[in-house]
Image (tube, coloured by chain):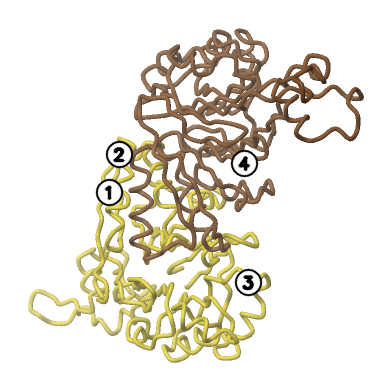
Chain colours: A yellow, B brown
Amino acid sequence: MSFTLQILGSNAAIAAHHRHQTSQLLTMMQVPFLIDCGEGTQARLKKFKIKSQRIDHIFISHLHGDHYYGLMGLISSLHLYGRKKELNIYAPPGLKEIISIQLKYSQSSLNYKINFKEWTPGESQLLFENVNLTVHSFPLNHRIDCSGFLFREKPKKRRIKKGLLEKDISPLKIISLKDGKDVLDDDGNVLLANKKYTMEPARSCSYAFCSDTKYSEAILPHIMGVDLLYHEATFMEDMRDRAATTYHTTTKQAGEIAKKAKVSKLLIGHFSTRYKELEPMLEETRSIFENAELAIEGETFSVE
Amino acid sequence: MSFTLQILGSNAAIAAHHRHQTSQLLTMMQVPFLIDCGEGTQARLKKFKIKSQRIDHIFISHLHGDHYYGLMGLISSLHLYGRKKELNIYAPPGLKEIISIQLKYSQSSLNYKINFKEWTPGESQLLFENVNLTVHSFPLNHRIDCSGFLFREKPKKRRIKKGLLEKDISPLKIISLKDGKDVLDDDGNVLLANKKYTMEPARSCSYAFCSDTKYSEAILPHIMGVDLLYHEATFMEDMRDRAATTYHTTTKQAGEIAKKAKVSKLLIGHFSTRYKELEPMLEETRSIFENAELAIEGETFSVE
């Protein structure tokens, strides 16, 4: 499969109804990314048998406590578990100061290095890149600086058709074919026509994370056509005014964003504690955008 | 009863074996005191059905994360739950800065006021006093500045013997008797002899909290004769060297402190994660000081 997203927490503000604050583990092209880190995230990682030492990249959307109060504990535990390899934190301005001051007063020097990569409020930036994928920030519209994140696989290489090539073909020729080139002989004649031996590349998948934000069509260019969109839906539709004044989104608004962005699937979360039962929230969302799901803690969503 | 102590967490450094980081709720003379606040303390308060809004006084022993990482989340939740009354935090130097910087970046102004009462490292100070009790700090010997806390009921008034006084006796006369005075008539003659109508006051109880510290007899004057002593015992006796280099205490050393301080009862805690089973720790402690117990999460210890 192309990527999986496991929900570690999806309640707003405080823990309630056995739901915890925002955190998710995205695994794309074998790289695990932790997104937000509410209090007790490390306990949830443990509960779901996710090895925290495998995580090298943590993205924090903003500095409201329900999105990062678990980070300091996780950092300390990684140290106590003997971590040596570097940890990359893609952070809002201020987070480095918050962490550094706590390390200073505890007189702790970590066994490992933290690389703080600060995103710039109001901008879309390339935060992470490897051979297979990129991660970009993009601005959300919240009460304080807040960033969404777009995880996107890079365009893939062409696929070799099975059973047509001789078994002892050289790796260099395979690479040429995957790169979309014909294989030529020494005189420049076409030996293996690319069109004959290869198929279109597999589709490149993408995941967008939007929390917290008021309804904002300004995010559409960033999330257009993604395979999976996580969008907060703190309130139901009858609280649209309250959603606006608190810089949050309603169920139907999240559905509207998903529809306008032509995404394949929508996942709603960041549920207000006032909602014990979530099915009505899902129904409202689906009245606008059918392929929607609830971000239920512990569940894993896969995109093939 | 005179006081109760409920254990909310007693593991060292990280959560393990269903044990969490240090936190306790002491209720003395109807006042609940929260002592230390490891990550997830608010979840434990909820689990044990303790109303967090009743807590007006929080004591933090030092700035290692396992003793305070849950504080910021608790402060935020109290705000979200609508708290208006002031919260008093008896804090090591630095804690105010750590909390203030997080409130600054979240652009949150709390609905209630926090009074930071900083204790001075290396000194014993009166931190809290009401009509019934006092709380003093006293220095522990840890890797960073760390304070123990002594909670002590004030001397109580004499008790009236039952069935001897007339029923319509005036409240003023009762007060005189409780204060240890005779009641005189207008000519100055003894009307009610104190000795006849009163008994010795009830004993004043005391609780001492010592975490984290290496073995240190310097604390003895502060904890002498307390009814209940909580003393860390991070390691078993075979790790005495490791205890010393990490500024912690062993089971037997905790027992020795309890014996030398002539306390009534000893509670050990702050167990290293290396110990899944705690009974051997208790046995070792009891080999030195018989009336010892384990600080097991959820258990309540009462002193009459």
Amino acid at dot 4:
Pro
The image shows residue B65, relative to residue B233, as above or below, that is: below
At x 60% / y 62%, what residue is drawn?
A19
Disc 4 vs disc 1: which is toward the camera?
4
Give the residue number, with chain letter if any, for mark 4.
B32
Residue at (55% x, 31% y) in the render: B134
**Of the two numbered discs 2 and 3 in the rendering, the one whose residue sits closer to the viewer:** 3
Amino acid, disc 1: Ile
Determine if marks 3 and 4 fall on one subunit: no
Check disc 2 and give the amino acid type.
Answer: Leu
Q: Do labels 4 and 1 share a chain?
A: no
The image shows residue B26 at horizontal and vertical percentages of 62, 35
Is label 4 in contact with label 2 (beta carbons under 8 Å)? no
Q: For residue A30, which quarter of the picture?
A: bottom left
Identify the mark at residue A114; answer none if there is no mark: 1
Question: Callout 4 environment at 10 Å: few (<14), some (14 to 19), or many (20+)?
Answer: many
Query: Which chain hosts label 4?
Result: B
Give me the C-alpha separation between circle 1 and circle 3.
37 Å
Q: Which residue lies furthest to the left in this view?
A: A187
Mark 2 or mark 3: which comes first in sequence?
2
Q: Are marks 1 and 3 in contact (CB under 8 Å)?
A: no
Of the pair A265 and B225, the residue shown nearer to us: B225
Give the residue number, with chain letter if any, for mark 3.
Answer: A274
